Amino acid sequence: MGEGAIRVTTGLSDIEIERPGEAAAEDAGAAPLSTWAKARPSLGRAVEWLAEQAARQADRWTLWTPVAFGCGASAYFTLLREPQAWGWSGRCRGQAALILGARRWSRARALTATLVLLACAPGGFSMVKLRTEDAKAPVASLDARPQKLQGWVVDIVSPGRAGHAR
């Protein structure tokens, strides 16, 4: 086809197929589609698989800290009621004490890494809670009376050639 030419296809093929599956080679090795549920793994196999995955990630455990932090932050948004801030800050302090104790008295790197990852979840939860408390607007009490508010316009920013000013 030359430059600028348009190719139009009809969707039809010059290969005639008599029955479904005929186009695949007999020795292709593809299994037929099965909707049967596979057998669930046993608890022992699941624990074995988790241990294998943990061993594979042992040198990269620090890369999992944002994931643990994010899990704690997302747990905050699943709650139906607003939690108290003091409880979560106490948990963070307790986790920090456990981590410092593990680093000082235990030589097991896996224990320290596990405690750090476990501390990141309440840390993420607490960070979201503290940010919520910081951004919270004041709430007027039920018995508050209407108040008069007076103010002055100090400056008006007009848009320039580039559009609206920021």
Image (tube, rainbow, N blue to C red):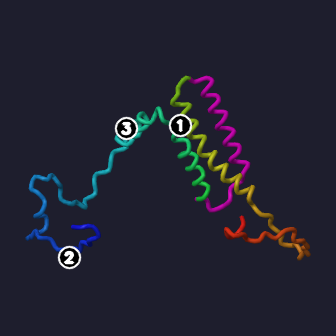
Q: Does the magenta stretch mainly form a helix, a strand or a loop?
A: helix
Q: Earlier in the sequence, mark 1 or mark 2?
A: 2
Q: Nearer the viewer, residue 165 or 133?
A: 165
Q: CA distance from mark 1 to mark 3?
A: 22 Å
Q: Earlier in the sequence, mark 3 or mark 2?
A: 2
Q: Quadrant of the N terminus?
A: bottom left
Question: Is label 1 in contact with label 2 (beta carbons under 8 Å)?
Answer: no
- Disc 2: which residue: 10
Disc nearest the viewer among 3 and 2:
2
Q: Is residue 135 above or below residue 117?
A: below
- Disc 3: which residue: 48
Point 28% across, 51% down: residue: 39
Q: Nearer the viewer, residue 10 or 63?
A: 10
Residue 54 percent location from the top left of the image: 44, 36
Q: Amino acid at mark 3?
A: Glu
Is disc 2 surrounded by few (<14), some (14 to 19) or many (20+) residues within 10 Å? few
Q: CA distance from mark 3 to mark 2?
A: 54 Å
Q: Nearer the viewer, residue 118 or 46?
A: 118
Left or right of 113? Residue 4 is left
Q: Nearer the viewer, residue 122 or 24?
A: 24
Judging from the image, what secondary structure is the residue with disc 2 in? loop
- Disc 1: which residue: 62
- Residues drawn in magenta: 78-106
